[in-house]
Image (tube, rainbow, N blue to C red):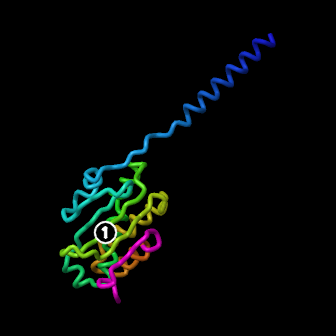
């Protein structure tokens, strides 16, 4: 009887170890192609996408009139309009290997105006909801209520790595 218990206990231990090992298999790391990233932002025609390793780089040409009339405010808000959006959130959800999304805004001539990089780990479910709310209000009502654009800029500066070209952002 003792021998049977030892075999049963040993067999149970082997089954447990094999079961644990099977449960430890990680899911494959999936990184999108530039074309796949582009489909998430398909509603914007003045946009190009490149992948730099596991970072999506989205370049958007910002309207010259916006930059001229809106000055520093519109120059700084540009990247955050795209970063804090449902397409960016969906990219992080759909592609577990995507480390960050970088949005670069340029003037029509190609001069870089601003850039901001949102790391995958920067926002959780709660802060994503807040980011989408702030960004949505800025997109909808920002031309009438400039404080909404300022709120989005402050949120962006708190949650991203960013750079602005001083030619466009001097106050």
> Whole-percent x and y of residue 167?
30, 85
Identity of the residue drawn at 78% across and 12% down: 3
Most extreme residue toward the bottom is: 171
Identity of the residue drawn at 64% across and 27% down: 16
**Magenta stretch?**
157-171
Q: Nearer the viewer, residue 61 or 77?
A: 61
Instruction: Classify residue 38 as left or right of residue 162.
Output: left
> Whole-percent x and y of residue 32?
33, 49
Q: Nearer the viewer, residue 72 or 129?
A: 72
- Is 99 covered by the magenta stretch? no
Q: Quadrant of the N terminus?
A: top right
Instruction: Classify residue 58 as left or right of residue 128.
Output: left
Most extreme residue toward the right is: 2
Q: Nearer the viewer, residue 112 or 19?
A: 112
Give the labeled residue for mark 1. Answer: 104
How packed mark 1 is, by other alpha carbons closer than 10 Å (few <14, some 14-19, many 20 or more), is many
């Amino acid at each position: 009887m003792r021998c049977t218990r030892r075999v049963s206990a040993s067999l149970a231990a082997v089954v447990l170890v094999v079961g644990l090992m099977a449960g430890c298999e990680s899911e494959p790391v999936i990184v999108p192609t530039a074309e796949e990233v582009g489909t998430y932002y398909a509603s914007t025609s003045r946009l190009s996408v490149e992948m730099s390793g596991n970072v999506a780089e989205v370049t958007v040409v910002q309207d010259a009139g916006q930059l001229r009339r809106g000055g520093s405010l519109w120059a700084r808000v540009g990247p955050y309009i795209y970063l804090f959006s449902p397409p960016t959130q969906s990219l992080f959800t759909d592609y577990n290997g995507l480390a960050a999304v970088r949005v670069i805004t340029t003037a029509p001539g190609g001069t870089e105006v601003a850039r901001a990089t949102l790391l995958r780990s920067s926002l959780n479910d709660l802060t994503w909801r807040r980011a989408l709310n702030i960004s949505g209000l800025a997109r909808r009502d920002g031309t009438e209520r400039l404080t909404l654009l300022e709120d989005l800029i402050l949120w962006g500066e708190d949650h991203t790595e960013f750079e602005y070209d001083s030619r466009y952002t001097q106050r």
